[in-house]
Image: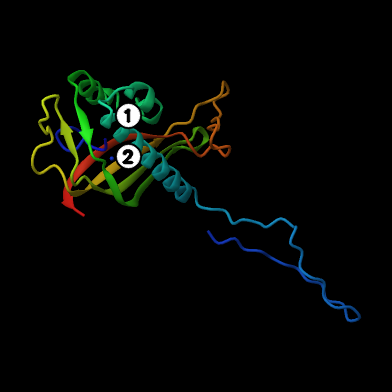
Amino acid sequence: MTATRDLLGVLLVAATLSVTACQSQPSPAPSTTGHTPTPTRERSAIAFEDAEAAYRNYDEVSDRIAQDYYRGWQDGLGSLVSEESVPNWGDFFAEGEAGGYHMMGSDVIDSVEAWKYEEDDPALGGETVTLRVCIDSTGVQELSPEGIDMLGEGTTGKYFHVITMKHEPELSVSNDPLPDVDDPQGLSWWRWAGAETWYETC
């Protein structure tokens, strides 16, 4: 889930065509097989994009696990969470599994705002992105084995959350970032590193 049990708890491609005009012959047609250069994008823009995608994936997986009585949370979420930043993150899921709790409904991400980008060590891929997310938890319940909603009043609705995502790529023996198998450019490896609920409606 995107919040704790107490709080509710988640281009323009420019093409340059060069045409040489001859006085005795018509201009040749522009080639459609040549390479089209792509402008360099700001690293922060790429980071925000990748971090948001990783967060959306985390939110979907964590919701699914919570709906299934928190079973399989270690395997499902272990690679999606920064254990360095949130060493005790598993306590919530372990408690849910042991207690027989489960979630009814799903959090809905209404909007995501790129809020802050911090570069730590670019050589090692260490970056942090902060996202301001509007999450709609209307109708979400966390039920005890007895069917009691453990969230209580005032914890569902549309509220802003501040989500922290950390770029933590796997490193080779020479400390070079390794690309994720799903991301040959090495722009993945973003992990959930914490959330704070703002009780400000959105």
Q: Which residue is mark 1?
A: 85
Mark 2: few/some/many CA within 10 Å (<14, 14-19, 20+): many
**Residue 26 picture location, percent across and down:** 85, 78
Quadrant position of residue 155: top left
Quadrant where the image shows the N terminus? top left
Are discs 2 and 1 less than 8 Å apart at CB? yes
Classify 132 as above or below 90. Answer: below
Screen quadrant of the C terminus: bottom left
Residue drawn at the location 32% of the way across and 39% of the way down = 164
The tally of labels here is: 2
The residue at the far bottom in this view is 23
Toward the top, the furthest residue is 98
- In the rendered view, would you say 40 is above or below 142? below
Q: Position of residue 192 (x, y in %)?
A: 35, 34
Residue ID for mark 2: 164
Give the structural element (helix, strand or loop) at label 2.
strand
Is residue 51 toward the left or the right of residue 173 in the image? left
Residue 201, above or below 189: below
Q: Dot 1 surroundings within 10 Å: few (below 14), some, or many (20 or more)?
A: some
Callout 2 amino acid: Thr
Q: Quadrant of residue 156?
A: top left
Q: Residue at x 10, y 44 (%)?
A: 154
Amino acid under label 1?
Answer: Ser
The residue shown at (34%, 38%) is 60
Q: CA distance from mark 2 to mark 1?
A: 10 Å
In screen coordinates, is 196 left or right of 47? left
The answer to whether residue 75 is above or below residue 117 is above
User: Would residue 77 appear left or right of 19 to someone viewing this image?
Assistant: left
Q: Residue 51, position in %: x, y?
A: 41, 42
